[in-house]
């Protein structure tokens, strides 16, 4: 999978995970599966060369949110 495909997959998984968390009733199996897939994809993205830029700012990871 090329870098662009990895970014698209990352965006897709993030959106699916957000949807799963926003559902009225959590499907923990689905959430766990999505989190595992996202973690594996993040490891693949981390192995990209350091100068590899995100090609679309809409796909860039969100900055961490402060804890409540």
Image (cartoon, grey):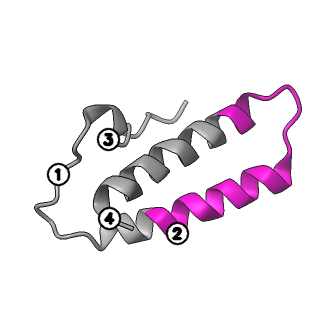
Disc 1 from disc 4: Cα separation: 13 Å
Q: Earlier in the sequence, mark 4 or mark 2?
A: 4
Disc 4 from disc 2: Cα separation: 15 Å
**Crowd rating for badge 4 (residues with CA inside 10 Å; few <14, some 14–19, many 20+):** few
Label 1 secondary element:
loop
**Mark 3, residue position:** 60
23 on left or right of 7: right
Specify the quadrant of the image occupied by residue 29.
bottom right
Q: Outermost residue, left direction? A: 51
Specify the quadrant of the image occupied by residue 58.
top left
Disc 3 from disc 4: Cα separation: 16 Å
Q: Earlier in the sequence, mark 1 or mark 4?
A: 4
Query: Would you say the residues marked 3 and 1 are in contact, meaning their CB atoms lie under 8 Å apart?
Result: no
**Mark 4, residue position:** 2
Residue 49 position in % (x across, y down):
17, 70
Query: Would you say the residues marked 3 and 4 are in contact, meaning their CB atoms lie under 8 Å apart?
Result: no
- Report the magenta residues as a range: 19-41
Residue drawn 10% across the image and 61% down it = 51
Label 3 secondary element:
loop
65 on left or right of 40: left
58 to 29, vertically: above or below:
above
Residue drawn 48% across the image and 52% down it = 9
**Mark 1, residue position:** 53
Q: Earlier in the sequence, mark 2 or mark 3?
A: 2
């Amino acid at each position: 999978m090329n870098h662009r495909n990895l970014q698209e997959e990352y965006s897709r998984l993030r959106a699916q995970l957000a949807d799963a968390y926003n559902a009225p009733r959590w499907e923990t199996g689905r959430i766990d599966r999505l989190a595992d897939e996202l973690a594996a994809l993040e490891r693949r993205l981390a192995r990209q060369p350091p100068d590899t830029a995100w090609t679309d700012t809409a796909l860039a990871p969100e900055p961490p949110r402060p804890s409540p």
